[in-house]
Image: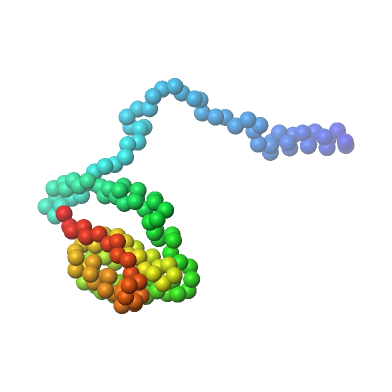
C-alpha cells in the first residue's frame, strides 16, 4: 500500500508539475529587416474631398514641451487641489465651453488655478478668441488674477 501511494505521488508530480526550464527563443545575430524596424511617423496623410492625398507635417510641439519642463513654468499637474481652486477652474471651463463660437482649440486651453490665481495656456485660432477667453476668466477670477500664456495659431 505504501509503495502504491509513493508511485501515485511520483506520477502526479510528473503530470501536473510545470516544466523546470522554460524554452526561450534562440538569440539571433541578424540585423532586423526593413519591415521589422520601426521609424517614427513624420507625415500625416489625409484624403481631401476630391480623393487626393493631403500630406501635412505632424504637430510639432517640441519647443512647448521643453518650455514646460522648466521649474518656473506651470503645468496642468500643478493645479491646486483646494475646493476654491477646483471650483474656480470648473467655473471658467464651463464658461468657455458654453461659448459655441469658440474653436475646439479655444475649448481645450489649459486652465491652471493656484491659490486664486489663474494661468491660461495653449493655442487659440484668433486674437478675438484669446481676448474672449481672457475676459471670461477675468470676470470669474477677478481683475489682475489671470495670467495669459495663450498663443494665437491661425489655420494654415
Q: Residue furthest left?
A: 50
User: Which quarter of the rendered picture does the N terminus lie within?
Assistant: top right
Of residue 138 and residue 155, the one placed in the foreground of this image is 138
The image shows residue 20 at horizontal and vertical percentages of: 66, 31
Residue at 80% across, 33% down: 7
Number of labels in the image equals 0
With 77 as the anchor, is 120 left or right in this view? Answer: left
Foreground pick, 27 / 151:
151
Q: Nearer the viewer, residue 154 or 3?
A: 154
Quarter of the rendering containing residue 153: bottom left
- x, y percent for residue 85: 43, 71
Residue placed most toward the observer, 103 or 31: 103
In the displayed structure, 41 sits above or below 80; it is above
Residue 37 seen by the camera: yes
Quadrant location of residue 6?
A: top right
Outermost residue, front side = 144
For the question of whether residue 108 can be seen, the reply is: no
- Above or below, comparing residue 43 to residue 49 in the picture: above
Horizontal side of 77 relative to 65 (left or right) equals right
Q: Which residue is painted at 35% across and 48% down in the image? A: 66
| Residue found at the far right of this picture | 1
Tell me which residue sits at (48%, 68%) in the image: 81
Quadrant of the image containing the C terminus: bottom left
Which color scheme did the rendering employ for the protein?
rainbow
Identify the residue shown where x is 68% and y is 37%.
17
Name the spot of residue 31 as percent of width and height, x first. Answer: 39, 24
Amino acid at each position: 500500500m505504501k509503495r502504491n501511494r509513493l508511485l501515485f505521488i511520483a506520477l502526479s508530480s510528473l503530470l501536473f508539475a510545470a516544466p523546470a526550464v522554460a524554452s526561450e527563443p534562440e538569440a539571433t545575430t541578424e540585423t532586423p529587416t526593413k519591415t521589422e524596424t520601426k521609424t517614427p511617423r513624420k507625415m500625416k496623410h489625409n484624403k481631401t474631398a476630391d480623393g487626393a492625398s493631403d500630406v501635412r507635417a505632424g504637430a510639432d510641439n517640441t519647443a512647448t514641451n521643453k518650455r514646460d519642463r522648466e521649474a518656473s513654468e506651470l503645468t496642468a499637474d500643478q493645479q491646486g487641489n483646494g475646493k476654491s481652486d477646483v471650483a474656480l477652474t470648473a467655473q471658467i471651463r464651463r464658461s468657455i465651453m458654453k461659448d459655441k463660437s469658440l474653436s475646439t482649440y479655444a475649448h481645450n486651453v489649459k486652465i491652471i488655478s493656484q491659490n486664486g490665481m489663474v494661468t491660461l495656456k495653449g493655442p487659440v485660432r484668433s486674437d478675438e478668441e484669446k481676448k474672449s477667453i481672457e475676459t471670461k476668466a477675468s470676470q470669474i477670477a477677478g481683475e489682475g488674477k489671470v495670467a495669459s500664456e495663450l498663443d494665437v495659431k491661425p489655420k494654415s
